[in-house]
Amino acid sequence: MVKTYAYNTRNLVTGVSYNDNGATPPVSYTYDEYGSRATMEDGEGQTTYVYNGFRQLERTPDVPWIGGDDLHAEATRTISAGS
């Protein structure tokens, strides 16, 4: 499968598409004036990112947090050779 990336004038990824005849839905991203991700839309729907006054990720309202008011977020991506 080949992934095609689209970028804005600030070289931030605005979209990812796949050449698998629509089996994998495209992904699109928007950013705020600071270059922080504002939204991500994929086949599951749209995720909105919320930042505090220090420009730190505060929450994503679309994702239920486990553990009350504690913010625990972890992102892991594994890339294998040939990807």
Image (cartoon, rainbow, N blue to C red):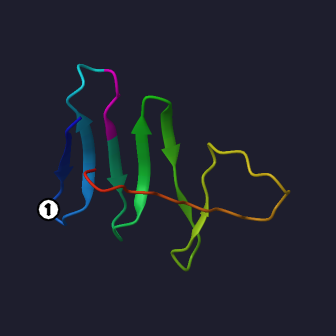
Residue at point 72%, 64% (across, down) = 71
Mark 1 residue crowding within 10 angstroms, few (<14) / some (14–19) / many (20+): few
Residue at image location 40% in from the left, 65% down from the top: 36
- In the image, residue 73 lies in the stretch drawn in magenta: no
Magenta residues, dominant SS class: loop
Q: Nearer the viewer, residue 52 or 14?
A: 14
Reply above or below: 64 against 72: above
Left or right placement of residue 2 versus residue 44 in this view: left
- Across and down, in percent, residue 39 comes to 43, 49
Amino acid type, mark 1? Thr
From the viewer's side, name the closer residue of 79 and 59. 79
Residue farthest to the bottom, as pictured: 54
Label 1 sits on residue: 9
| Quadrant hosting residue 56 | bottom right
Which quarter shows the N terminus?
Answer: top left
Q: x%, y% of residue 9?
A: 14, 62
Q: What residue is at 37 percent from the left and 61 percent from the top?
A: 32
The correct choice, above or below, for 21 with respect to 33 in the image is above
Q: Secondary structure at mark 1?
A: loop
Q: Which residue appears farthest toward the right when viewing the image?
A: 68
Find the residue positioned furthest to the left.
Answer: 9
Determine the image quadrant of residue 40.
top left
From the viewer's side, name the closer residue of 67 and 55. Answer: 67
Q: Is residue 5 left or right of residue 36?
A: left
Total tally of numbered discs in the picture? 1
What x and y, as percent, mark residue 45? Answer: 49, 32
Magenta range is 23-27
Q: Residue drawn at (51%, 48%), measured in percent from left and top?
A: 48
